[in-house]
Image (cartoon, coloured by chain):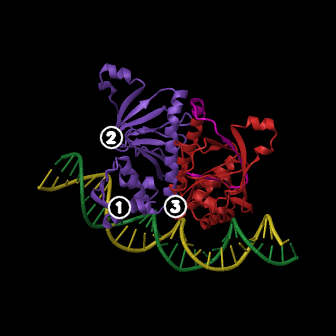
Chain colours: A purple, B red, C yellow, D green
Amino acid sequence: MYSQIAFPPSHYADRTARTDISKSFPPSIIEDTQLHQLVVFAPNAEIYAQGEPTSSLYQVEFGTVRIYRLLADGRRQITAFHVAGEFFGFEADDAHHFFAEAVDRCGIRICQRPLDKGLASELLPIALDALVRAQKHLLVIGRQCAGERVAAFLIDMMERQGDMRHVELAMSRTDIADYLGLTIETVSRAFTKFRERGYIRLKSARTIDIVDVDALRILCA
Amino acid sequence: MYSQIAFPPSHYADRTARTDISKSFPPSIIEDTQLHQLVVFAPNAEIYAQGEPTSSLYQVEFGTVRIYRLLADGRRQITAFHVAGEFFGFEADDAHHFFAEAVDRCGIRICQRPLDKGLASELLPIALDALVRAQKHLLVIGRQCAGERVAAFLIDMMERQGDMRHVELAMSRTDIADYLGLTIETVSRAFTKFRERGYIRLKSARTIDIVDVDALRILCA
DNA sequence: GTTTGAATTAGGGATATCCCTAAGGGAAAC
DNA sequence: GTTTCCCTTAGGGATATCCCTAATTCAAAC
């Protein structure tokens, strides 16, 4: 299954960390969820790998998922993070073109439902939304400097977490760097600069208060 | 319609360069093409603008189209080029999120057909293919160096033009730079280096023979 | 409370790419 | 044939980001 890729990310993903908790559910619920069972993944567990046959459709119940691709020498680009409620993993053909891993502990609903026309009309807006997101991210990575990229990332994360001027980051600086096309050091420096300027407050490296939203928004406009 | 964007690209697009040639067709053909009329655009003519209401669906009949987005200060990221046969311009909601312009003279079939379930199942694989393309391009822009990006671009163009070890580029170095997240000088230097190494032969700046495909493939692997 | 290990931040030199200017080349217009 | 204009290529200094090393912080394990 890995024949197409040079370096399978076994050093990243923990294939033993998968747990099917449907067994602990009462029978009636198992019945209901035959076609979309809930599976819990431990942090850094692999959900699927590039080259694997497509399994139809995944929805995040809780936690955060990273979608990524690798170059032969190990360079990684995370193309998307997915949080609760979001769908991912549907492909045009019968094989996955990307890797998907749990960032933190997360629950995934896996639907095996066949792709009929009804499902297509449901999936199309989701796919189109993902397309717009990816293309907007191209602008960030292709044309914005480090500070602007990190600002855009923080704003995006804040809005997806309810716009409460507060962000809980599930992912490490390495993940952020690989998402933004930067190095971990550059990401860290951007955070430090934002803190020094009073744009953000770091309760810990991953717990962030957004003090000056406007400053960040102007930066990444 | 432009209220959302800071600098409408009037300096790029020529809005007067649009021609509806259906008038010159015999009546029967006009009848047949009521729902998907062919429109010819002059080089650099605007096909649609960010913020405009969605028109359903576009298909390239001949020529090349660029899809792009702008930052407030004018920085531009081309997210995709589209050539004969390819679809573009369908959006999740009722407004365009990007600009579309003719690169060279090109004919576009514009379908006004309403979005029913049958169309959704046709569109979904196209949208998913576009999504995969965009996400793969993220890896190129986010993690590959200038030479690798240009090599990937040449390989991609060659394969889309029939894999004949020959490429006819419709777009300028500026367009290529804005597609690859580089400057025009860096793109030009990459071409020069490939020529010096014997990977390519430049009959003119836009007419290219691929001499050593493998070298280019290894570069961007 | 201490130890351990991973993640983050900091420091500083190296460098790929950017930025600015200008020369070269090729197609269209005159 | 000449001119004009735009696109492309070239040169070289400037700089943001990378790369490598090391200090610091933090959380988990003992």
Query: Which numbered disc covers residue A131?
Result: none
Measured in 3D between alpha carbons, the distance from the residue under mark 1 to the one under mark 2, in whole angstroms, is 25 Å
Q: Amino acid at mark 1?
A: Phe
Tag 3 residue: B6
Residue B177 lies, in percent from the top left, at: 60, 61
Q: Is residue A64 above or below residue A146?
A: above
Measured in 3D between alpha carbons, the distance from the residue under mark 1 to the one under mark 3, in whole angstroms, is 27 Å
Chain label for disc 3? B
Tag 2 residue: A105
Residue A217 lies, in percent from the top left, at: 41, 59
Relative placement, left or right, of A153 versus B32 is: left
Q: Answer with mark 1 or mark 2, whichever residue precedes in sequence.
A: 2
Chain label for disc 1? A
| Secondary-structure class at tag 3 | loop
Q: Amino acid at mark 2?
A: Arg
> How busy is the neighbourhood of tag 3: few (under 14 within 10 Å), some, or many (20 plus)?
few
Q: Amino acid at mark 3?
A: Ala
Asked if the residues shown at circle 1 and circle 3 are in contact, with their CB atoms under 8 angstroms apart, the answer is: no
Measured in 3D between alpha carbons, the distance from the residue under mark 3 to the one under mark 2, in whole angstroms, is 41 Å
Tag 1 residue: A191
Q: Marks 1 and 2: which is nearer the front?
A: 1
| Secondary-structure class at tag 1 | helix
